[in-house]
Image: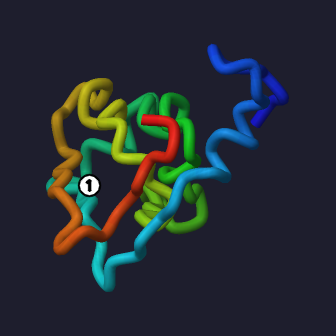
Amino acid sequence: MSKETTRGGAPREERLSANEIRPHRGSHLELTETAHCEACAKPCVAVCPAGTYAWSGEQGRILISHENCLECGSCRGICPYSVIRWKNPFGGTGICYRYG
């Protein structure tokens, strides 16, 4: 990530590090149909501000690091095949934003 500042004037990394992430045992993210990902331009990888998605050429699939997720929903909105299933993390787990 770059050292861009946000509306509050603080570097983006500083603002993101102020958030609390309460891990959940399982993933709240799932790809429902992975065959589409091979032919796709993989916009989920490019749009995710937290690096939750990564393309593995060796494995021929998208890798998901659900613990990085900021729960912004960008991935669902940009997926041309609508194959990303996102569920709310259970029982107060997930991200807790300090700056709203």
- Position in image of residue 98 (x %, y %): 50, 46
Front residue of 82 and 27: 27
- Position in image of residue 67 (x %, y %): 46, 67
User: Looking at the rendering, in which quadrant would you find the C terminus?
Assistant: top left
> Height in image: 77 above or below 88?
above
Residue at 22% from the left image edge and 64% from the top image edge: 89
Query: For the view shown, which residue lies furthest in the top direction?
Result: 7
Q: Would you identify the image quadrant in which residue 38 lies?
A: top left
Mark 1 — residue? 34
Image check: 15 left or right of 59? right
Residue at 28% from the left image edge and 31% from the top image edge: 79
Q: Amino acid at mark 1?
A: Thr
Query: For the view shown, which residue lies furthest in the bottom direction?
Result: 25
- Position in image of residue 55 (x %, y %): 54, 51
Image check: 96 left or right of 46? left
Residue at 50% from the left image edge and 53% from the top image edge: 52
> Height in image: 3 above or below 13?
above
Count the marks.
1
Residue at 78% from the left image edge and 21% from the top image edge: 4
Q: Secondary structure at mark 1?
A: loop
Q: Would you identify the image quadrant in which residue 30 lies?
A: bottom left
How many neighbours does mark 1 have within 10 angstroms: few (below 14), some (14-19), or many (20 or more)? few
